[in-house]
Image (cartoon, helix red, strand yellow):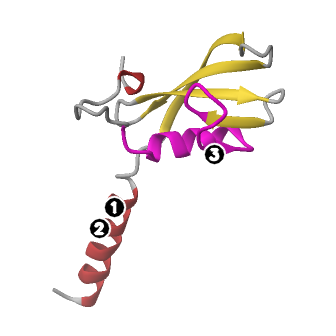
Amino acid sequence: MNKTQTMGAIALLLLSASTQAARPTSIVFETLAKTEDGVPYAQFTVRCNDGKTVPLTAWDNRRRWCIGETANGSCQNKQISAAKAACDEPPVTTTAGAVASVYSR
């Protein structure tokens, strides 16, 4: 293999490795809701290119975006950052080892 072929093979390998990361393909608004304390928030669903769906909530007039259905999870200041983080997170498993239902429909 000459130098050009080697460099091409390395470039393809790096490109294919970067495409393996799950990425958001859509962010769909679901509903507006309030906590028991009366704090308003919006619920969204993020769909990833690997088929996973993840709930996302927006708090503080959509200034804080959190993975999951509470503000206690992983939160970001931007919607796209939270969506990317949601797709990168491994599925949550229950004590029995089954994948939690919030990540698939």
Tag 1: Cα neighbours inside 10 Å, few (<14), some, or many (≥20)? few
Q: Residue at x 72, y 13 (%)?
A: 36
SS state under label 2: helix
Magenta span includes 78: yes
For this rendering, which residue is in front, 31 or 98? 98
SS state under label 1: helix
* Marks 3, 2: nearer the viewer: 3
Which quadrant holds the C terminus? top left
For this rendering, which residue is in front, 36 or 92? 36
Q: Which residue is mark 3?
A: 81
Tell whether 54 sits left or right of 36.
Answer: left
Tell whether 37 sits left or right of 23.
Answer: right
Dot 3 amino acid type: Ser
* Marks 2, 1: nearer the viewer: 1
Give how far apart the Cα atoms at labels 3 and 2 are.
26 Å
Give how far apart the Cα atoms at labels 3 and 1 are.
20 Å
Q: Which residue is mark 2?
A: 13
Magenta span includes 57: no
As drawn, 23 above or below 4: above
Which quadrant holds the N terminus? bottom left
Q: Residue at x 62, y 28 (%)?
A: 70
Q: Marks 2 and 1: CB-CB under 8 Å?
A: yes
Tag 2: Cα neighbours inside 10 Å, few (<14), some, or many (≥20)? few
As drawn, 37 above or below 73: above
Q: Magenta stretch: give its range.
A: 67-91
Going by the picture, which residue comes out furthest to the left? 1
* Residue 17 percent coordinates (x, y): 33, 61
Q: Which residue is mark 1?
A: 17
